[in-house]
Image (spheres, helix red, strand yellow):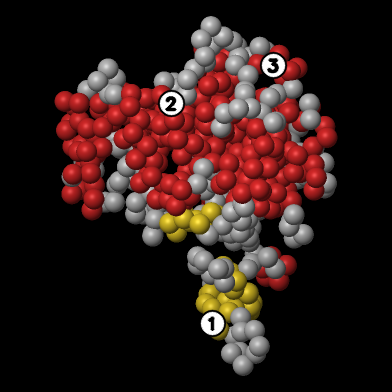
Amino acid sequence: MARLYWEDENVMTDKPQKTASLTLDGKTYELPVISPTAGPDVIDIRKLYAQANVFTYDPGFTSTAACDSTITFIDGDLGELLHRGYPIDQLASKSHYLEVCFLLLYGHLPEAGELETFESLVTNHTMLHEQMVHLFRGFRRDAHPMAIMTGVVGAMSAFYHDSTDINDPHQREVASIRLIAKMPTIAAMAFKYTVGQPFVYPRNDIDYASNFLRMCFAVPAEDYEVNPILARAMDRIFTLHADHEQNASTSTVRLASSSGANPFACIAAGIACLWGPAHGGANQACLEMLNEIGTVDRIPEFIARAKDKNDPFRLMGFGHRVYKNIDPRAKVLKESADEVLELLGVENNPILQVAKELEAAALADPYFAEKKLFPNVDFYSGIILEAMGFPTSMFTPIFALSRTVGWISQWKEMISDPAMKIGRPRQLYCGEVARDYVDIENR
């Protein structure tokens, strides 16, 4: 039987430190307790196996800190998301995506000259190596854009040999800029390929979000005039999805990075993980639910089903696994959603009509307020992308585009950590113990 407790160690020392005591089979082991700048204390079990010959068991790593980080902090109970200490609602309201990219990468808000240099670097690296264009044509026309993005990003290591050495700080920097700059081009080309339209190349005279929208919706016969309201909404979607601490795809990037894999392979691994419907497909699932509801008159039926404990139906886009209160990203994106719907109208789109009425019905219902099932960022991003004309198959690629800077920031932080080790989770083995091989004629 094991017993675990912790207490303050000798308070007379210069640096008092908490310790946790684990009592196992009559022996007691002292484990350091690390106090972060924010969040719960962490019991350091790195020497537990060597000292006590036991592992800990934590499926999904939901109670295990696998790294230390200075990038992003989430307090789900308070509904708080901070990037380098700055609240996400302030960044989304007052800043823009490339400034947030700089913040995540370098740890501080840039001065005017720093931001101008950074934006210039990104803008001047948005084009792909021309031979990479042929990669797209190797996919079937009905390939999912995420399949295309996973393959093309992984293939970047075959074209950009001068930025694959993870031990060279300069090459790490070059790879970071290239990935942030080229991801919108890759995502837009994946979209154009699946709809059978010619690729549209990036331009250096428009901003990051406008460039992406133009590459998606312009055609050679007619250019696409980017409405500033739509560009601002897209920029906010990018900003609000830029990083989200140690989620599944970020942990995948870190685990791949721990082996020494090149940055393009690591980001491709993150894209593959994000493709899972339990992770990156939430806004797509929200639109599929709206399609299932179909018309405004059916909303009361689905509201009633959501309240029925015996009905497996759930309102997608409401509530959040991490945030036990309001999703701090949703408040800002709701503003853009309202602006986009007012600009484009909902009269000719029954799905958007359903979305608007469902939002109003849920916010007015005490049941959802008591359960804290408020519309989240996926609800608003889904209806914005639908209104802009993106098919649901493009929702997760846009998420991947947005999250690239978060993955890169986490990757750079990990590579620079002198304590970095290759990831090697342990297991609770429940299979057969050693047994002798039996010849086939005796089985």
Asked if one can make out residue 329 in the rendered structure from this viewpoint, the answer is yes
- Residue 122 lies, in percent from the top left, at 66, 36
Q: Residue furthest top?
A: 221
Which numbered disc, 2 or 1, marks the residue closer to the eye? 2
Q: Which residue is drawn at 32% across and 42% down?
A: 375
Spatial CA span between label 2 and label 3 = 28 Å
- The picture quadrant where one finds residue 416 is bottom right
- Report which residue position mark 3 lands on: 133
Is 397 on the left or on the right of 329, as rendered? Answer: right
- Report which residue position mark 2 lands on: 227
Above-or-below relation of 145 to 373:
above
Q: Nearer the viewer, residue 134 or 270?
A: 134
Question: For the residue labelled by badge 2, is the local secondary structure a helix, a strand or a loop?
Answer: loop
Determine crowd level at label 1: few under 14, some 14-19, many 20+ residues with C-alpha closer than 10 A.
few
- Report which residue position mark 1 lands on: 7
Q: Hey, what amino acid is under mark 3?
A: Val
Q: Nearer the viewer, residue 188 or 310?
A: 188
- Residue 263 lies, in percent from the top left, at 72, 39
Q: Which of marks 2 and 1 is nearer the N terminus?
A: 1
Spatial CA span between label 2 and label 1 = 59 Å
Q: Hey, what amino acid is under mark 2?
A: Asn
Asked if one can make out residue 434 in the rendered structure from this viewpoint, the answer is no
Q: Which of marks 1 and 3 is nearer the N terminus?
A: 1
Q: Which residue is drawn at 53% across and 6% down?
A: 221
Q: Hey, what amino acid is under mark 1?
A: Glu
